[in-house]
Image: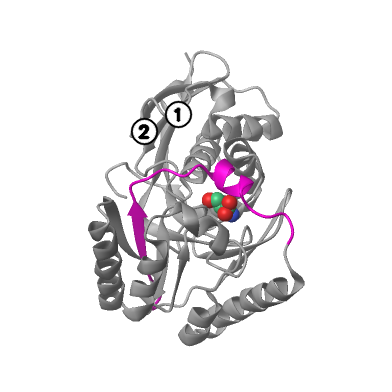
């Protein structure tokens, strides 16, 4: 037994909203309240072992090579190169799977942050990104970096390329609030990517990239009105929204209550709506909730400012 045997590090990575309407696979931001904890500790054994998963027990594989967090850590250790003692991971999921809130990304990011700290921080935060993307590849079948980058860095991010990841951190307007409604159904990212059309009509592509540019400009200039006018998805939302009961009505209710913009969070079924103050965010949430109540679907509601901190070392009690 060496000294390292007693060291243990816990990291938290937040839930994230990918796509932000117009930016399929290229835009994302992090929120507060939801996320995953991963504790990493040295053991006398060899290799990486997932000792325990709490929260979504039974739904996630304990085999390291099949688990997104495990795969991300294996990728980190391969790059680290040096022989290390065995590492044990405990994953505490504080967010639902298949919710469109970046559940697999939160586990992967928290795992690489915890293990990096356990090893004495051989990698910078930016260098951790490709390791977490490897985990995402296993979860969704594509190495998209929008959830992992937002969970790792916090705030808004733009993914220029995914593999290897080239990510730009964008500014976060101070007053921006987010309403998240999570209808209690599960949608697998793999499935909701499979149904997407592979070709996009030019006129829709033109509108879409204009909206991405305008949204980024709105973030830089604190132009809330422009942000709202740009959270508009011509391509993905019309296809995926049919999987979400009450989508059209919830979006209409959010906009009616003054939401700047509203769309599907990641691959759904959660929706997000942006607003410029907390009271509006709450009223929007109540109005969206009424729609789900009327169709008899249970849901969770979350109101959050944008999380600009991203992943961090944290005790499990402090989400
Ligand atoms: N950009 C990804 C998608 C995010 O929409 O499929 C998945 O959460």
Element type where label 1 sits in the image: loop
Residue 213 coordinates in the image, percent (x, y): 65, 77
Residue shown at 50% from the left, 34% from the top? 118
Q: Quadrant of residue 157?
A: bottom right
Q: Is residue 311 above or below residue 7?
A: below
Q: Quadrant of residue 295?
A: bottom left
- Give the side of residue 130 with respect to residue 225, left or right: right
Query: Which range of residues does the magenta coloring cover?
Result: 175-199
Q: How many marks?
A: 2
Few, some or many residues within 10 Å of mark 2 (<14, 14–19, 20+): some
Residue shown at 55% from the left, 23% from the top? 64
Which residue does the numbered mark 2 point to in the structure image? 56
Which residue does the numbered mark 1 point to in the structure image? 60
Residue 194 coordinates in the image, percent (x, y): 63, 45
Residue 313 coordinates in the image, percent (x, y): 42, 46
Note whether ligand 1 is within 8 Å of mark 1. Answer: no
Q: Quadrant of residue 220?
A: bottom right
- Observer-nearest residue: 118 or 112? 112
- Observer-nearest residue: 32 or 238? 238
- Give the side of residue 133 with respect to residue 307, left or right: right
Residue 212 coordinates in the image, percent (x, y): 63, 73
State yes or no: residue 170 in magenta. no
Q: Are marks 2 and 1 in contact (CB under 8 Å)?
A: yes
Tell me the CA gap for discs 2 and 1.
Answer: 7 Å
Few, some or many residues within 10 Å of mark 1 (<14, 14–19, 20+): some
Element type where label 2 sits in the image: loop
Q: Is residue 224 above or below residue 200?
A: below
């Amino acid at each position: 037994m060496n000294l390292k045997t007693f060291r243990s590090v816990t990291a938290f990575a937040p839930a994230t909203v990918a796509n932000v309407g117009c930016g399929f696979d290229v835009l994302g931001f992090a929120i507060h309240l939801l996320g995953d904890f991963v504790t990493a500790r040295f053991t006398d054994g060899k290799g990486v072992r997932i000792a325990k998963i709490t929260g979504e027990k039974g739904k996630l594989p304990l085999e390291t090579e099949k688990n997104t967090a495990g795969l991300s850590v294996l990728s980190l250790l391969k790059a680290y190169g040096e022989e290390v003692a065995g590492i044990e991971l405990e994953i505490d999921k504080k967010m639902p799977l298949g919710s469109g809130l970046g559940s697999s990304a939160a586990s992967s990011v928290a795992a690489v942050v915890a293990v990096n700290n356990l090893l004495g921080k051989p990698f910078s935060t930016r260098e951790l990104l490709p390791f977490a993307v490897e985990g995402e590849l296993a979860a969704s079948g594509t190495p998209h970096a929008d959830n992992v980058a937002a969970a790792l860095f916090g705030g808004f991010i733009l993914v220029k390329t995914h593999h290897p990841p080239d990510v730009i951190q964008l500014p976060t307007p101070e007053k921006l609030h987010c309403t998240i409604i999570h209808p209690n159904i599960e949608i697998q990212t793999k499935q909701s990517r499979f149904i997407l059309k592979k070709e996009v009509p030019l006129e829709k592509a033109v509108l879409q990239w204009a909206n991405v540019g305008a949204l980024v400009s709105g973030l830089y200039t604190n132009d809330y009105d422009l942000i709202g006018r740009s959270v508009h998805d011509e391509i993905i939302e019309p296809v995926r929204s049919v999987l979400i009961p009450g989508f059209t009505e919830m979006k209409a209710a959010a906009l009616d209550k003054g939401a700047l913009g509203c769309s599907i969070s990641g691959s759904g079924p959660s929706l997000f709506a942006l607003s410029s103050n907390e009271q509006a965010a709450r009223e929007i949430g109540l109005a969206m909730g009424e729609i789900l109540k009327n169709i008899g679907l249970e849901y969770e509601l979350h109101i959050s400012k944008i999380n600009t901190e991203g992943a961090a070392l944290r005790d499990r009690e402090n989400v």
